[in-house]
Amino acid sequence: DVQMTQSPSSLSASVGDRVTITCRASQTINSYLNWYQQKPGKAPKVLIYSASSLQSGVPSRFSGSGSGTDFTLTVSDLQPEDFATYYCQQSYTTPLTFGGGTKVEIK
Amino acid sequence: QLQLQESGPGLVKPSETLSLTCTVSGGSVSSSTYYWSWVRQPPGKGLDWIGTIYHNGGTYYNPSLQSRLTISVDTSKNQFSLKLRSVTAADTAVYYCARRRTETLTDYMDVWGKGTTVTVSS
């Protein structure tokens, strides 16, 4: 299985901050990397697919980059509604696997 | 607008079979463009992919569950289903169904159900 390692596992930030979350795959996954946001009691919502493509309807303050094994999700100008848990997920090979999550909390 | 809705018992006894159905509305489960997946989330933990079924009935299962798992599709009802046999407390989770969108160099779950909580307990 491809192991997905996210860091940090949690972070505290303020409204207006720029936040960066990293995700590392245990083997190359090309650009088959997706980012999801999950709020408490809600289903995950895709933000970024194929490493850097913004899903329709997602604010442009979210961006993704990377290829191969190292990937980044950046949220510029953090907004109150962005406080949530973020997961990366590889779709290069089955079983599909997720990172452990990064909880973004209000400082 | 495509919507997915999970349904099934919220409580299952240990060693019994967990059965869930996902009803697709606003779209067709027969579409060759999309695949249909199950994902679960144990309490307080992260997301785990369970498996995927294609419109033609082809399946991919998580090897960790494969021996206990069956995913099927009913095109006449526009539904797909999950059966997990011989459950234990470790199968307690929120279960989500999701549409998996696959195109050239693209593969992600773009529409999700709201999730249903399943507790395994006697």
Image (cartoon, rainbow, N blue to C red):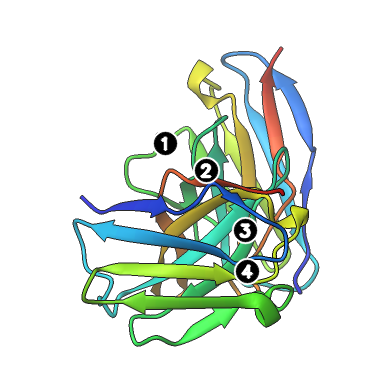
- Residue B18 falls in image quadrant: bottom right
Residues at marks 1 and 2, CA–CA distance in whole angstroms: 7 Å
Q: Earlier in the sequence, mark 3 or mark 2?
A: 2
Residue drawn 71% across and 78% down? B63
Residue for badge 1: A60
Residue A63: which numbered mark, if any? 2
Front in this rendered view, residue A12 or B77: B77
Judge if badges 2 and 4 mark residues of a common chain. Answer: yes
The chain under label 1 reads: A
What amino acid is at disc 4? Leu
Residues at marks 1 and 3, CA–CA distance in whole angstroms: 20 Å
Q: Position of residue A74 (x, y in %)?
A: 60, 38
Left/right placement of residue B26 relative to residue A83 reads left
Q: Secondary structure at mark 1?
A: loop
In this rendering, does residue A94 appear at all? no
Q: Secondary structure at mark 4?
A: loop
